[in-house]
Amino acid sequence: MSLLELRDVHTYYGHIHALKGISLRVEEGEIVTLIGSNGAGKSTTLRTISGLVKPRQGEVRFQGKPIHRLPAHQIVALGVGHVPEGRKIFPRLTVEENLEIGAYLENDRKVVQKRKEEVFALFPRLYERRAQKGGTLSGGEQQMLAIGRALMQNPRILLMDEPSMGLAPVLVDFIFEIIQRLNREGRTILLVEQNARLALQIAHRGYVLATGEITLEGPARDLAQNPEVQKAYLGEG
Ligand SMILES: Nc1ncnc2c1ncn2[C@@H]1O[C@H](COP(=O)(O)OP(=O)(O)OP(=O)(O)O)[C@@H](O)[C@H]1O
Ligand SMILES: [Mg+2]
């Protein structure tokens, strides 16, 4: 049984048919990447998994159970963490308050405190800035905060939407190292990226999405060698 599985998922925005029958799976312990051009449906795929939009047809299964009819907060409670595109942190709240909101389903203060310490250990920069308002953080720090906030719920799978977007190369490398570290520590990751080159370097497997459909899938190493992928997404050939 896969940790996460999508079967023939169709998602619409009004009459825009954004996902046209997506099937994919993520096994426990994997980094799986979803690559594709602007508007391909990458964010919609993650939003459909976390229940922010509902599929009109098809199934999303998590740990073998269908979740696509559950409200988003129940999907979070089952262990699906979402780091959204554009970070979406709360600009007027402090770093620490943003993290606490990430653990809003957790009632045990000791657990919340322990998770916060884990996030601060992963991102010492956030500890230094814990009293600072989220909106005054740099782009890289906001990305750290968005990841930290998702980790506060101790998710079994982390859905990451373009974590490298808009970051300087040194910060991109740092965020990718963090993703690999989280994975080594046992976290399963579904990573959406426009930086296909880096994503395919750290992922185990990948899917290529084009206008709402999966066009290619396989081990990340094979995809990186695929001439079509090189031409369309790696700027080669
Ligand atoms: N809220 C919305 N209302 C209407 N159409 C939408 C909405 N969000 C996305 N779409 C459309 O759905 C399609 C898929 O969008 P989506 O954001 O999933 O693409 P993406 O692969 O994440 O793109 P990007 O790389 O630019 O982030 C696009 O055609 C987009 O215009
Ligand atoms: Mg997107």
Image: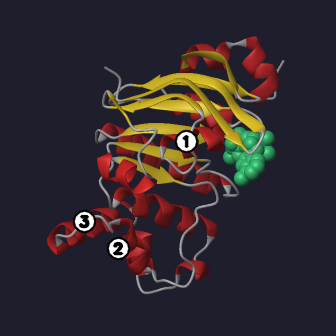
Pointer 1 residue: 48
Task: Report whether 76 appears left or right of 214.
Answer: left
CA gap between label 2 and label 1 equals 25 Å
Q: Which of marks 1 and 3 is nearer the N terminus?
A: 1
Furthest residue to the right? 237
Q: Is residue 174 visible?
A: yes
Q: Is mark 3 on a helix, strand or loop?
A: loop
Q: Which residue is drawn at 35% across and 23% down?
A: 2
Q: Nearer the viewer, mark 2 or mark 1?
A: 1
Specify the label residue 106 is tagged with. Answer: 3
The image quadrant that residue 143 belongs to is bottom right
Q: Where is residue 112 in the image (x, y as percent from the top left)?
A: 24, 69
Q: Which residue is drawn at 77% across and 29% down?
A: 211
CA gap between label 3 and label 2 equals 9 Å
Q: Residue at x 57, y 77 (%)?
A: 137
Task: Report whether 182 appears left or right of 195.
Answer: left
The residue under label 2 is which amino acid type? Glu
Please, is residue 70 above or below residue 114 in the view?
A: above
Q: Mark 1 touching mark 3, by CB under 8 A? A: no
Please, is residue 72 above or below residue 135 in the view?
A: above
Q: Is mark 1 on a helix, strand or loop?
A: helix
CA gap between label 1 and label 3 equals 24 Å
Label 3 CA crowd tier, 10 Å (few <14, some 14–19, many 20+): some
Q: Position of residue 114 (x, y in %)?
A: 20, 67
The image quadrant that residue 230 belongs to is top right
Quarter of the image where ligand 1 sits: top right
Specify the label residue 100 is tagged with. Answer: 2
Quadrant for the C terminus in the image: top right
Q: Where is residue 53 in the image (x, y as percent from the top left)?
A: 58, 47
Q: Which of 124 and 95 is in front in this view?
A: 95
